[in-house]
Image (cartoon, rainbow, N blue to C red):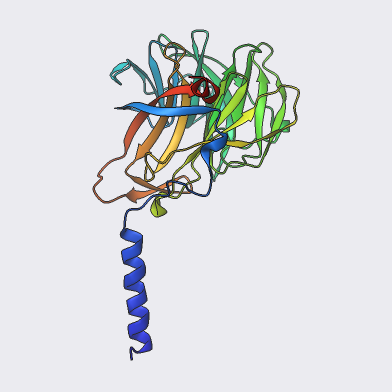
Amino acid sequence: MLGRTNVLSFLVVVVTVLMSVPFAFPANAYSDAGGMYSYDLAAVIQVPGRQGVATDGTYYYVSGSKALYKCDKSGKVIEANKEPFKTFPKEAVCNHIGDIDYYNGELYIGAEEFKEGRGFNIQIAIYDAKTLKHKRSIPFDEKSGQIEVCGITVDPMRKVAWMADWCNGRYLYQYDLTTGTYIGKLHLQPVPQYQQGVYYHNGYLFITADDGDANYWEPDHLYRVNGNPAATSGLVELEKTFNEFTRAGEIEGLCVDPETGQFLVLFNRGTNVVEGIPKGFYPGYEKEIHELYIYNMRKCSEEKGK
């Protein structure tokens, strides 16, 4: 018989081997049956930034944590601003950009000073989409209870911005872009874990969540909630499970191309990320790779009618 020490050693070996075997969860703990759209992967391109993505239909705009890039649709950089906070006043200093959005010739950016596990000086920073230069900012309202901004999106019909919070994802926060005032918040039920990006599309808010654990080959997810301006709470439903890349590391921003109707989502791979903090690289990587996954997006009701 094996001694206690040998048994423990054997179990450690077995667990280590099982953890190293690549496997995915094609069904996962959820079903995509309730998804409003279908997503067929059309292309994957590398981009220079790791945080957010927006498009005006002609260019892709990508954010790094401390940079903005304007790219053509192959991912080639056309313009860059590597000092996006240079003109910010000292009392509103920032060091982090999350997901971004494009609206009416401008880029809307959720900016903050991220430290001690939360955000400070949270603001809607607005940049010229042509030059990538900062134009103005709208400060957040402390009464909202928001403590971080991981992403921002614009409802172009109502001229309202929505901001998401990575630290406390219970709410999405609304701001009137005409007056710059805080309107209210939408209580998400249930709450997507580790939200990264938010995008308004056809009356709904789509949310990416870094809720899969890449160390266990778990995929991240896309959720949706009705963006009803009169509602104080909204039922969150699973829209898509990203089984295409179960060890991406981090899912980030998202948007829909107004010219092609394609769905874009930014993924980072190679870095071992634990609760938002990089912890080195996975085997085979010496740097993190940032990629846009581009999907042909079709409403499921349209597919049934074909």
Q: Residue at x 66, y 24 (%)?
A: 227
Considering only vertical position in the picture, is 42 above or below 168? above
- Residue 263 seen: yes
Q: Residue at x 37, y 46 (%)?
A: 247
Vertical relation: 193 (above or below) 44: below
Viewport quadrant of the N terminus:
bottom left
Q: Position of residue 301 (x, y in %)?
A: 55, 23
- Of 106 and 16, nearer the camera is 16
Q: Tell me where residue 35 appears, x and y as whole percent.
A: 55, 32
Labels in figure, total = 0
Residue 134 at x, y percent in the picture: 48, 15
Residue situated in front as seen by the camera: 222 or 301 = 301
Query: Which residue is found at the position 46% from the left and 29% from the top?
Result: 253
The residue at the point 26 percent across, 51 percent down is 283
- Residue 53 in which image quadrant: top left
Residue 196: x and y in percent read 51, 35
Q: Can you see residue 91?
A: no
Residue 227 shown left or right of residue 223 in the figure: right
Question: Position of 71 compared to 220: left or right?
Answer: left
Locate residue 186: give its quadrant. Answer: top right
Residue 115 in the figure: left or right of residue 14: right
User: Vertically, is 39 above or below 136?
Assistant: below
State the residue lying farthest toward the bottom: 1
**Residue 17 located left or right of residue 139:** left
